[in-house]
Image (cartoon, coloured by chain):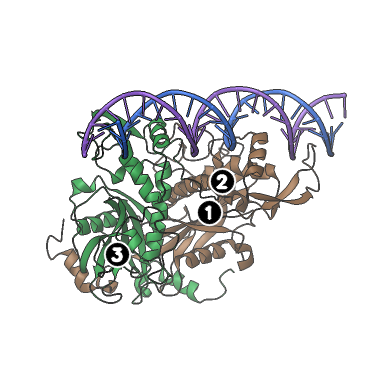
Chain colours: A brown, B green, C blue, D purple
DNA sequence: ATAATAGTGTCTATCAGACATTATCGG
DNA sequence: CCGATAATGTCTGATAGACACTATTAT
C-alpha cells in the first residue's frame, strides 16, 4: 500500500506542515476527575449550556491554547477552573494522561481530537461552573448510564458492590442523587476508560492515597479500594498487606483523636510513603471471568 | 482561580468551537513499530528529507486527515505506508495507542500535537520510504541514543543484556548497524515510553506472541521476553510457567521440522491462545531497585 | 561419545486468603 | 457487659525460582 497516486498523500506532501491548507482539527483536553464523597465515587461534570447536547452533563474540558501551553498544563488549567482550586490545593491532586479520542464524528460540528486526563482528588468543596458551562458538580458515577445502553440499564463496567446510595429515587438529575443519564459526546466511554484505569492503577501504585487527606487510617485506605473496586476486602489481610509493602504508607506515630461512633480502639494514622510503585502489588479479588 | 478576567477564557467562550479564530494546532500520529530481527529489537524509522532535523531519523507519522479518519485509522495507514504491508498482513500487527505529546515547542514550526501509537510486528521485510521521507528502515533500538544525553552515552532505559550486536563499529548510520544518533523532535522520548510500555505489556498480556509467526516454539517465545526485557530467563521455569497460564498458548500437535543446528530434540509448536490477559502474569525479574 | 537443547520433576521460600484471637473503645 | 472495631497471629494452598534430571538430536 505504497502511495497509490497523487491524491491525499501528495497533497499532504505539498502542504508540508501548514494545516491551514486543510480542514482544521480542534484539540481539546477533557478531564475525568474522580473523588470520594460519602463513601461513593464521584466524577466532576459540567452541565452544557448550549447545543449540541444542551442540558446534558459532560466532562469538563476546553481548547488547548495553541503555542502557549502543553497538554498537561491545559488539563491542570481546566481542572482548576472547574474546581476552584488554587495551585497549592491542586498540588495534592494526581493528574495523568488517559488517552486521546479522535473519531471524525464524535463532535457533530467538526473534527475534534480530545486528549483525556484522569485526576484523583481528595475530598473537595463543591464545584463551580467555569467557561461556557451552565453548571458544575460532582456526580456519583453509578448515576451515569454507560454508553450505548438505555438510560435505565446499568450493566457491568459501572459500580458493582455497595449499592448504598439513593439511586433510583427520582427527582430529576441533581448532582449527588439519582440518574444523571448519559454523558454528552463520547464522554461516557472516556469515563468508563478512566474508571478502568483507576481500578488498575491502584493495584500497583499508591495512588489510592490521593483520594484521602494528608493522614489517614488503614481502614479509610481500605474503603477507597472497596469503593473503587466495588468489592469488599478482608480487613485483617488488607491491613497486614498494606503495612508489608515497602514505602506504601508510613506511620505518623499518632492515633485518631476519637474512634468510630460505634466504639473500638483508636486507629493509628499514616501518611503516604515514598514508593511510586507497589512491590508486590495489591491484586484485585478474582475476576478470572474477565476478558479471556 | 475562577475566571479572573475577560482574557483568554472569554475569547474561548466567544469563539465557541471554531478554531479558525485561533492559531491552529496540527494533529499528527506517530508510530513506534517494534519488531525482532536477528534476536534484536528494532524500531521502524524514517530518514528526514528536509528541515528541521534533516538527515536525522524520526518515527514514521503524518497528519490526521480531518473529518475523514479516526486516530486509529490514521496510525494504521501510516504504518502501512511505511512498511508496505497489505491489509491482511497488517491484521497480524498489534496496534495500540501509546499517548499524546503536545508541548507548544516540540516542533519549531508550529504547535503540533502528536498522538503516538505502539505496534508489535512479526518479522517483516525491509521498510520502504513513504510520504516525504528520504528513507526508511528498521533500526536496532540500542543504536539510538536516549534523549537528553550525548550520542555516545547509553544508560539505563535502553537495552541492558545481550550486547551481541555490531554496535560501536562505526561506518556511518546505516540501519541495522551502529549508532543512529538521537531521533528527531521528541521522538526519543516517545520511543522510550513505547519501550517501557512494551516491557510492561508482555507481562500481563500475550502480546509477545505478536512478535512471532503463526506458530512458534516455547524457546522462541522465551527469546522474545529475553530480548524485550533485556534479561535472561530460566528456560525450564519459563516453559512450565507459559504452559500453566490458561489461554496463553495452545499446542498445534506438531513439532519443528528440524531441531536447532547444535542438536537437541525437536521442539513442539504452539500458536497464540485465546486469552487477552495472562492470569497469573509473567513478572519481570526483580527490578526492586526500580522507582521508589 | 559429547555437547546442546527440550521438557519434566522436586524442593523451598514466599505470599494471598481464610480464620481465629486479643485489645480497646462506646453504649 | 456487649457489640463493634483495630491490629496481630496462625494455618493452608498456590506459586516463583533454584536446581536436578531425562530424553533427543547434531557433530
Whether residue B215 sits left or right of residue A219 in the image: it is left
Give the secondary structure at mark 1: loop
1 and 2 marks on the same chain: no
Q: Where residue A32 appears, x then y in whole percent?
A: 50, 54
Give the secondary structure at mark 3: loop
How many labels were placed on the picture?
3
Mark 2 is surrounded, within 10 Å at the Cα level, by few (under 14), some (14 to 19) or many (20 or more) other residues, namely some
Q: Which residue is mark 1?
A: B290
Mark 1 is surrounded, within 10 Å at the Cα level, by few (under 14), some (14 to 19) or many (20 or more) other residues, namely few
Whether residue B107 sits left or right of residue A276 in the image: it is left
**Residue B178 versus residue B124: which sits nearer the camera?**
B178
Res A279 label: 2
Q: Quadrant of the C terminus of chain A?
A: top left
Please say if the residues under marks 2 and 3 sit with CB atoms less than 8 Å apart.
no
Badge 1: chain ID? B
Please say if the residues under marks 1 and 2 sit with CB atoms less than 8 Å apart.
yes
Please say if the residues under marks 1 and 3 sit with CB atoms less than 8 Å apart.
no
User: Residues under labels 2 and 3: Cα distance?
Assistant: 37 Å
Q: Where residue B189 appears, x then y in whole percent?
A: 40, 64
Badge 2: chain ID? A
Residue C26 in which image quadrant: top right
Badge 3: chain ID? B
The structure residue drawn at horizontal position 36% and vertical position 49%, both measured from the top left corner, is B227
**Residue D18 versus residue B120: which sits nearer the camera?**
D18
Q: Using the rendered image of the protein, determine whether residue B288 is visible from the camera's viewpoint.
A: yes
Q: Where residue B15 appears, x then y in whole percent?
A: 41, 71
Q: Which residue is mark 3?
A: B178
Q: Is residue A71 shown above or below A18?
A: above
Amino acid at each position: 500500500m505504497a502511495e497509490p497516486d497523487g491524491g491525499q498523500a501528495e497533497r499532504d506532501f505539498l502542504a508540508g506542515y501548514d494545516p491551514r491548507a486543510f480542514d482544521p482539527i480542534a484539540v481539546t483536553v477533557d478531564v475525568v476527575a474522580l473523588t470520594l464523597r460519602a463513601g461513593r465515587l464521584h466524577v466532576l461534570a459540567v452541565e452544557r449550556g448550549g447545543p449540541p447536547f444542551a442540558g446534558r452533563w459532560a466532562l469538563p474540558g476546553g481548547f488547548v491554547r495553541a503555542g502557549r501551553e502543553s497538554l498537561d498544563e491545559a488539563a491542570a488549567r481546566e481542572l482548576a477552573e472547574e474546581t476552584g482550586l488554587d495551585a497549592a490545593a491542586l498540588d495534592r491532586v494526581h493528574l495523568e494522561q488517559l488517552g486521546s479520542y479522535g473519531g471524525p464524528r464524535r463532535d457533530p460540528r467538526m473534527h475534534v481530537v480530545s486528549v483525556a486526563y484522569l485526576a484523583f482528588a481528595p475530598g473537595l468543596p463543591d464545584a463551580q461552573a467555569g467557561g461556557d458551562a451552565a453548571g458544575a458538580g460532582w456526580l456519583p458515577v453509578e448515576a451515569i448510564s454507560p454508553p450505548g445502553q438505555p438510560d435505565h440499564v446499568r450493566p457491568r463496567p459501572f459500580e458493582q458492590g455497595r449499592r448504598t446510595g439513593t439511586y433510583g429515587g427520582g427527582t430529576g438529575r441533581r448532582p449527588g442523587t439519582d440518574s444523571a443519564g448519559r454523558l454528552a459526546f463520547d464522554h461516557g466511554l472516556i469515563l468508563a476508560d478512566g474508571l478502568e484505569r483507576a481500578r488498575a492503577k491502584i493495584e500497583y501504585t499508591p495512588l489510592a492515597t490521593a483520594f484521602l487527606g494528608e493522614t489517614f487510617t488503614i481502614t479509610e485506605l481500605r474503603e477507597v479500594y472497596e469503593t473503587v473496586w466495588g468489592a469488599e476486602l478482608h480487613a485483617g489481610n488488607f491491613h497486614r498487606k498494606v503495612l508489608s509493602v515497602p514505602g506504601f504508607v508510613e506511620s505518623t506515630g499518632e492515633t485518631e483523636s476519637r474512634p468510630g461512633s460505634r466504639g473500638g480502639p483508636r486507629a493509628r494514622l499514616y501518611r503516604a510513603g515514598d514508593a511510586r510503585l507497589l512491590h508486590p502489588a495489591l491484586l484485585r479479588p478474582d475476576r478470572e471471568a474477565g476478558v479471556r
